Amino acid sequence: MKYLIVIEETTTGFSAYTPDFDGCVATGNTTEEVEKKMKEAIEFHLEGLELEKLAKPTPHTYSSYIEVQ
């Protein structure tokens, strides 16, 4: 499955979250690092759901850009 992650630049690096998992966040010094950490965070979250025999969430978010002048 593919989950949307949102990456934001901060004063100290980058942070990321996914709207598909409440509270699933990561930080890093580079975009590559924060993407890697988000992948690990999502995998960890999914493993926890599996151990608890809970359903994995279906991705329900997408992104789009709107052009304005």
Image: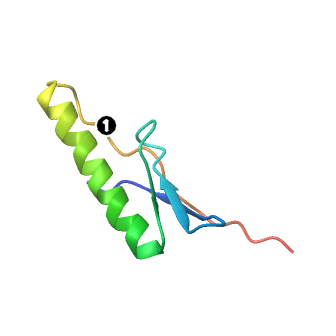
Q: Residue at x 20, y 34 (%)?
A: 48
Residue 21's place in the image compared with 55, above or below, is below
Judged from this view, the residue extending furthest toward the front is 12
Q: Where residue 65 sits in the image (x, y, percent)?
A: 64, 67
Q: How is the image coloured?
A: rainbow
- Please state, as top left, top right, bottom left or bottom right, where the C terminus lies in the image: bottom right
Choose top left, top right, bottom left or bottom right for residue 28.
bottom left
Residue 42's place in the image compared with 34, above or below, is above
**Element class at badge 1:** loop
Q: Nearer the viewer, residue 14 or 61?
A: 14
| Amino acid type for the residue under numbered disc 1 | Pro
Residue 13's place in the image compared with 20, above or below, is below
Counting labels gives 1
Q: Where residue 33 sits in the image (x, y, percent)?
A: 39, 70
Q: Residue at x 60, y 67 (%)?
A: 12
Q: Is residue 39 left or right of residue 15?
A: left
Label 1: few (<14), some or many (≥20) within 10 Å? few
Q: Nearer the viewer, residue 42 or 62?
A: 42
Q: Residue at x 20, y 25 (%)?
A: 54
Q: Where residue 15 sits in the image (x, y, percent)?
A: 53, 59
Q: Nearer the viewer, residue 69 or 56?
A: 56
Q: Residue at x 31, y 37 (%)?
A: 57
Q: Is residue 65 left or right of residue 59?
A: right
- Please state, as top left, top right, bottom left or bottom right, where the N terminus lies in the image: bottom left
Q: Is residue 17 left or right of residue 55?
A: right
Q: Which residue is mark 1?
A: 57
